[in-house]
Image: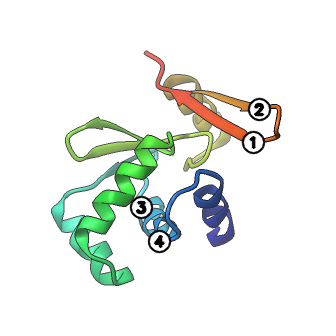
């Protein structure tokens, strides 16, 4: 899993430290693909991986900007179910249909661009 997370961080041109934060967040995902991130969670992650709390907030901002996760309410986020999901495949497919439209395009010079949007 660590290699997969490192690849996601590298593909999306995020700081290398985002991989550690992403790992900790993915561990907290529920079966609806959601995660609750409040000050207490940030403090625990900060202590566990040895980074400052603002670095966790910055990593979350970067993950949102790259469509790896989306904010759905204050302190409530949903992971891109094309990248992260938990549960039976039938339920994962439903999450993917409900939350996300994923597009992968390639530029003439071979660079990959991943975009997504939450569907209503």
Marks 3 and 1: which is nearer the front? 1
Regarding mark 2 in the picture, which secondary structure is present there?
loop
Q: Are marks 1 and 2 in contact (CB under 8 Å)?
A: yes
3 or 1: tag closer to the N-terminus: 3
Q: Which residue is mark 2?
A: 107
> Is residue 48 depicted above or below 21 in this figure?
below
On the image, which quarter does residue 89 sit in?
Answer: top right
* Mark 3, other Cα within 10 Å: few <14 / some 14–19 / many ≥20: many
Q: Which residue is mark 3?
A: 25
3 or 4: tag closer to the N-terminus: 4
Label 1 – label 4 distance at C-alpha: 23 Å
Q: Which residue is mark 1?
A: 111
The foreground one among 50 and 35 is 50
Q: Is residue 30 visible?
A: no
* Mark 4, other Cα within 10 Å: few <14 / some 14–19 / many ≥20: some
Residue 106 screen position, x and y as percent: 77, 33
Q: Are marks 2 and 3 in contact (CB under 8 Å)?
A: no
Q: Residue at x 60, y 38 (%)?
A: 92
Label 3 – label 1 distance at C-alpha: 28 Å
Q: How many marks?
A: 4
The foreground one among 41 and 18 is 18
Q: Which residue is mark 4?
A: 17
């Amino acid at each position: 899993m660590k290699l997969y997370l490192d690849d996601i961080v590298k593909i999306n041109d995020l700081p290398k430290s985002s991989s550690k934060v992403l790992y900790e967040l993915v561990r907290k995902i529920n079966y609806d693909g959601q995660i609750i991130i409040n000050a207490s969670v940030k403090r625990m992650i900060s202590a566990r991986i040895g980074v400052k709390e603002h670095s966790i907030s910055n990593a979350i901002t970067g993950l949102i900007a790259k469509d790896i996760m989306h904010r759905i309410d204050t302190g409530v986020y949903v992971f891109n179910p094309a990248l992260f999901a938990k549960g039976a495949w039938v339920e994962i497919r439903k999450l993917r249909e409900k939350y996300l439209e994923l597009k992968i395009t390639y530029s003439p010079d071979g660079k990959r661009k991943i975009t997504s949007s939450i569907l209503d």
